Image (tube, helix red, strand yellow):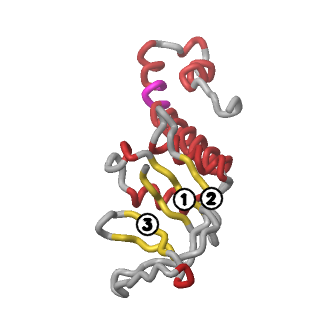
Amino acid sequence: MIHYDINYNRLGLALVPLKLRQPLLMGLIYVMLSGVRRAASVFSSYREETNYRLTHTGQVCYLKAVLNDRFDNAQRRITIEDVDARSGTIIYKRELSRFLMVPERTTGNAVILNKRAFSGSTSVDFTVIVPAELRGSFAEAQMQALIDTYKLASKRYTITYR
């Protein structure tokens, strides 16, 4: 960011001729430069934010870093794991507030599903594991929005608390 580091007070001082450098005039110039300094500060923070978003992609290591930076910056305990290649259907059980794997019919363990409460798909690609201590410290919708921003469009995921 060397091109954007400008000392505007020094620039204002350098642009005024020596004969005109009176305290009242310099104070007026510094006040006029305050808007420019504020705009430069907003630009600088926007540039840092944009560079952060551009350098972090949907790769697992970057997605994990983004989630830990946002939700668990101190201990960095949020992890991402691939889902086992187990056969079955993943459903969301409202009473437990979590996703469960229902085995296939061929295993002999019959499961009756309430169609109104059924919201499963055949599988997910990865799961985000969040420590149980972080439950309630942030809105899960914020985490989902952040994951949706960085993940590939075809990937499906679940958020589990352990």
Taking the magenta stretch, the answer to whether it contains residue 157 is no
Across and down, in percent, residue 135 comes to 35, 49
Q: Residues within 10 Å of mark 3 (few under 14, many from 20)?
A: some
Which residue is under mark 1?
A: 127
What is the spatial separation of the Cα atoms under label 1 and label 2, in whole angstroms?
A: 6 Å
Q: Is residue 31 above or below residue 61?
A: above
Q: Which mark is residue 99?
A: 3
Tell me which segment is drawn in magenta. Answer: 29-33
Q: Residue at x 59, y 23 (%)?
A: 7
Q: Is residue 24 left or right of residue 96?
A: right
Are the residues at dot 1 and dot 2 in contact (C-beta closer than 8 Å)? yes
Q: Residue at x 46, y 36 (%)?
A: 35
Q: Which mark is residue 79?
A: none
Secondary structure beneath disc 1? strand
Across and down, in percent, residue 55 comes to 68, 47
Q: Earlier in the sequence, mark 2 or mark 3?
A: 2
The three-letter code of the residue at mark 2 reads Asp
The three-letter code of the residue at mark 3 reads Phe
Secondary structure beneath disc 3? strand
Which residue is under mark 2?
A: 82
Q: Is residue 57 above or below residue 157?
A: above
Looking at the rendering, which quadrant does residue 82 occupy?
A: bottom right
The three-letter code of the residue at mark 1 reads Thr
